[in-house]
Image (tube, grey):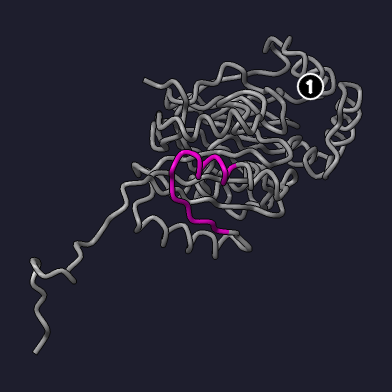
Amino acid sequence: MRKQYDRNRPHYRKPQYSNRPIFGVIINEQAFGFADDKIDFLISELARSRSNWHVIKSVTGKEATYQIKKLLTRQPTGIIACGGDGTVNLVARNLIRRTCALGIFPLGKYNNIYNSLYGQPDLEVAADHILSGHTRKIDCAMAGKHFFLGSIGLGLIPNLAELIGQKPPRFGIGWSRKVSLAAASVKAQKTSVTIDEFKFDATPLFMNINLLSHSLSLPLTPTSIDDDGKAEIVFDIGQGKANLSKFIRQILKKKYIYADEIQMYRGQKITIAPTAQRKLYIDGDIIKLADADLTVETCPNKIRVYFNGAE
């Protein structure tokens, strides 16, 4: 017979449950800006706020995804992505429609998602956002079966990302040279584009779809709004009319006004064809597409992010 405990007897102890918030901390030790002391700072801030935490050091995307899903059963307050855009993407795709919030501790090479949402990366500011307890919802999108939070790109941007490698240019003239080389390596291809109900053809060297303003640290779409359910598509009209080096120099100076040579539209559903075997830049990673066309659909207000000062 199972022993019955008497609540009035001295040996009985009522179970104690912690009311401290629990944070998942996803660490990408391969991130460009990773350092042990930066992680130590974040952990010390979590401890100072009297929070609990669970660290996951991801080796592969599949293993990290398994660990994140396992952690979500414990109903954490938030999950903090410690890395670059790829790490943020990995965490965010598991938080769609969840009350668990996304924290970003920027340790990447470009930190485009963090930069678009909060400004220039600052670890103290990042910790303040995470520990503020305030959140707000932002958009995400699907490019075919691929989730993204910041931007995708065909043509110039994936080629430029590969050319730059681990050493981003520091000055405008360095960017200009890299852009010229990257543009020369892009094979112009006639492309059909449908933006909601508007359809047209172009032969661009450069085409980007942005939910957030920055790609490769470049403020390509400064008018992007992170919670309006729309994406910006930016492209050159082709035919060699656009000077992409000049365009990037002006973008860096935040002086470019979209005109006839390089245009920008906004939409909720965007289809591009053909795309088979073309390289796609997606939140810092580069993949090769297999499908004949690519449909991008925005998912309004599906991701909750920490934001200090939100109402």
When the figure is inspected, residue 169 is found, relative to residue 259, above or below; the finding is below
Pick the residue in front: 70 or 93: 70
| Rendered image quadrant of residue 81 | top right
Q: How many marks?
A: 1
Locate residue 24, reporting x and y percent.
48, 51
- Report the amino acid beneath label 1: Ile
Q: Position of residue 112 (x, y in %)?
A: 65, 33
Relative placement, left or right, of 187 versus 13 is: right
Residue at image coords 39%, 37%: 302
Q: Which image quadrant: the C terminus?
A: top left
Position of the N terminus by quadrant: bottom left
Within 10 Å of disc 1 (Cα), the crowding (few <14, some 14-19, many 20+) is: many
Q: Nearer the viewer, residue 51 or 245?
A: 51
Figure check: 186 above or below 309: below
Q: Which residue is mark 1?
A: 248
Residue at left offset 46%, top offset 38%: 49
Q: Is residue 239 left or right of residue 23?
A: right
Residue at 66% in and 30% down? 121
Magenta span: 42-56
Q: Residue at x 77, y 19 (%)?
A: 252
